[in-house]
Image (cartoon, rainbow, N blue to C red):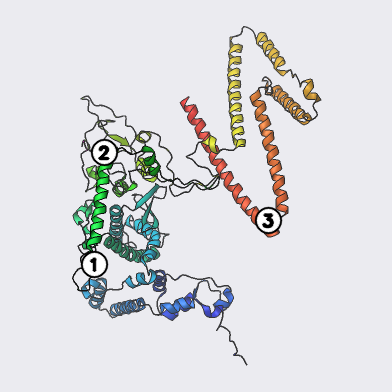
Amino acid sequence: MGRIKKKGEAGNAKNYVTRTQAVKKLQISLPDFRKLCIWKGIFPREPRNRKKASKSSTASTTFYYAKDIQFLLHEPLLQKFREQKVLEKKISRALGRGDVGDASRLERNASRPEKTGKPRYTLDHVIRDRYPTFVDALRDLDDCLSMLFLFANLPSTSTVPAKMIARCERLCLEFQHYLIVSQSLRKSFLSIKGIYYQANIQGEDILWLVPYKFNQRVVGDVDFRIMGTFVEFYMTLLGFVNFRLYTSAGLKYPPKFDQAKDDEAGELGAFKLEGNLVTAPSAEAPAQLTNGEAEAAPDPKTQAEVNKLIRQMREADVDGDGVETEPDKDDATDAIDKFEPAAPGGDVLPQPSYSGNEPESLFANCTFYLSRETPRQPLEFILRAFGCKRIGWDSVLGEGAYTTNERDPSITHQIVDRPVIQAAMEEDGDGEDNQTSQKLAPNQRMPGRIYIQPQWVWDSVNDGELKRPDLYVPGAQLPPHLSPFVQNTQGAYDPTIPLEEQQTEGEALEDSDAELDEDEVEADEDDDLAVKRIENGAASMDIAQSDDEDGDGDNGSFGGFSDEEKGDAEESEDEEQAAELQYQRELEAELTGKPIKQAPSNPQSKAKAEAKKRLAKQAKEEAEELERAKGMLSKKKRKLFEQMQYTNNKKSAEDQKLRAKRRKLEKQKAKAKA
């Protein structure tokens, strides 16, 4: 006879436990349980049958795997939480019996673990458990960097202590220094939320968000206790990652930190990187192991042959310098392969090039000066990450500048983010705009210097080349700043391609019709103005009225169709439609009192009308063919195909809206220029 199964000992009832049961089993408080789950990476689960998993009449909302809770029973942090709970009980008991000195002593010892030698807890073992390899830690670094950069820009409050903010800022600056040294930064994008950065470290792409340097308002509807738990974990993680990155690059960690420079807003300039002497010999050739024996000399015959080959190669090089080689062979060897799409409409791959300007040394030959209104922190980081060694700025922006003199002749580029100033000149001829500490007249430019707006830096970095500075001069309308993280797909709207190359034939016809309508409206308005002028300047109203009646009669006469068109049976429907349109025009003219708009008779208008009919007929045939093809599918595949079709139509409608918006803007620009 089989064993009798009891209720609640198998299935969902055994595999899942509620949050209340988990807290009771671990014997900790709910906040500590929440911390432990965040640090260990344990999150709630959804059972298949909530009623069976709850094992009670009341509906439970949060469930965990029983094995996960069993795993937490062996966590060393549990003992630290229990010791903290015992300490809190001792303090409350001392306060209850009126012993304030004993309670303050206990609290003072707890707040100074470095004095007592008993730290509260560390998360080092948790980091090692969650990330067995370094690549695992790099893959989980996106949220870590976004959270730490966010807290580095927050003001200190009771829920966000100043020590946490200072440590977050220091860890972030250390990580930025590694990106500058290793030249790992690849792309950046200015968005409404903040500045996105993308770096490539050991083959892993890391993307994070940095908020702008604005005054942040801490609102009350954000639970900073939960966020603080994540920050505490991420600070330990980034400390481990920075240590590994610095040691792999041959640098000491942590780098030397100058508190005086940091107090004067030095930021990146407050750190001094030093080489690690332990890793220095690794750059040399590795010594060969001889097992304690004397080093064996090379074979004389082999060495003689090697020396002979080296001598021949050197002679060939010397002869090759004086003799001209055949250009066709050299050209054939110097040519590089190009990646062509295998099929029309395939993905366009980036092409290789022989460009000597590497992206990492994009700004190596430039000397920049940052005006006081520009964002110094992101500009300094990006410029240094792409090879720039000489960056100056106004003295009010902080310490660490290459130069604070705006008149320095070595400056090649100056980044300005202010409009062209119309300042009033004083009697002695010196104008002052009160926007810079330098004594430069308004709109004065130093000769031989390029003035650009900050977007030039980001666009140059994303495109991998220095952009034209004339498009980014102060006061100019900047080109669109496009995200480098969006991959253009075939057939989708691409703002970098001219509108004529990506709009459909139907959209082109509608655009031409709209232009014709606008021209007709403008012509009608001009005619109305001319008629009003004639009426005002005429001697009598009878002459003007007779002229208008004659004009109406001439324009209102409908010549009809030719005998050949009437006799053609295939175009009978077109004739009826034309007659209806003409009748509609006559009614409109009679109501408004304007001349009748004649039907288009020029060849261009006829060609457009025929093209519209052809497109409508083609669309009708394609729709009928599609319906016949859908009838051959099964019900399941038909539903799937309809969902795909709905998504494609939605995307094409969005692309059409974007093209219409761009077409409207281009027309407005053309009118403004005219």
197 with respect to 400 (left or right): right
Chain part drawn in magenta: 401-413
| Three-letter residue code for mark 2 | Gly
Q: CA distance from mark 2 to mark 3?
A: 74 Å
Q: Which residue is mark 3?
A: 638
Tell me where residue 140 appears, x and y as whole percent.
40, 62
Q: Secondary structure at mark 1?
A: loop
Q: Nearer the viewer, mark 1 or mark 2?
A: 2
Q: Which quadrant holds the N terminus?
A: bottom right
Q: Which residue is mark 1?
A: 288
Residue 407 lies in the magenta-colored region: yes
Q: Name which of mark 1 and mark 3 comes first in the sequence.
A: 1
Q: Which mark is residue 322?
A: 2
Snapshot quadrant of residue 414 = top left
Q: How many C-alpha atoms fall within 10 Å of the one at disc 2: few (<14), some, or many (≥20)?
A: few
Tell me, yes or no, whether the two marked residues, 1 and 2, touch with CB atoms within 8 Å. Answer: no
